[in-house]
Amino acid sequence: MAGDVVGIWEVALSDGVYRIEFEHGTTTGKRVVWINGQEVLRRDWMFKLVGKETFTVGGMETKATVNIEAISGFTYEYTLEIDGKSLQKFIDNRSKVTKTWVLQVDGVDCRIVLEKDTMDVWFNGQKMETEGEFVDDGTETHFTVADHECCIKALSSGKKRAGIVHYLMVDGEAVPGWTD
């Protein structure tokens, strides 16, 4: 990558965390988008220095746009939109509709994501086959990871504002320390 990188963003999707880098050569008109170190878009000799570059991120081809705006003279502002929302709005929305756990299974770092609206479960970027069932105190979503029985329990918090809480169990043991 050249020395014209002007923006770096981290975007967490269900199928992984992506590092997006944007190069903008204001003297050459070059625009390059890198995702996790791989070049995904290149435009050379762009005479218009402001505008947008749209591309997709991840296996689900989530739409992303880098906006280039002139602030004053030759000073530019670069913002990232994901699914038509500012990055911050996208992150805020994701924290409401997903639950993410980062843990180790058999000594390997793992990332498990629950999409609350669809109850889809992702393990290290792969959508898992799951089996859901209703139980007395909520629901359980069962799946297997490397010969380990996993279960995500959805239970009422008992508090109107908190709503439903989700717990990950691996081989019958609760996994501590989750993130939203």
Image (spheres, rainbow, N blue to C red):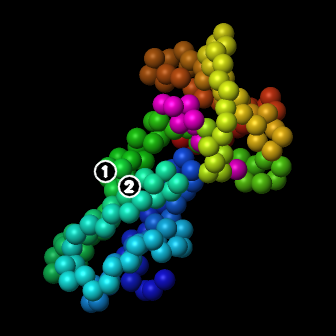
| Residue, disc 1 | 84
Stretch of the chain drawn in magenta = 110-120
Residue 73 percent across, percent down from the top left: 15, 81
Assess whether mark 2 and mark 1 are in contact (beta carbons under 8 angstroms).
yes
Residue 14 percent across, percent down from the top left: 54, 47
Residue 135 lies in quadrant = top right
Residue 127 percent across, percent down from the top left: 62, 43
Image mark for residue 154: none
- Quote the CA–CA distance across marks 1 and 2: 8 Å
Q: Nearer the viewer, residue 24 or 159?
A: 24
Query: Quick one: label 2, few (<14), some, or many (20+) residues within 10 Å?
Result: some
- Residue for point 45% across, 42% down: 94
Task: Give the left or right position of residue 73, taking residue 176 as reference.
Answer: left
Quarter of the picture containing the C terminus is top right
Q: Secondary structure at mark 1?
A: loop
- Residue for point 80% across, 44% down: 146
- Residue for point 45% across, 86% down: 2
* Mark 1 or mark 2, earlier in chain: 2
Image position of 154 with respect to 170: above or below: above
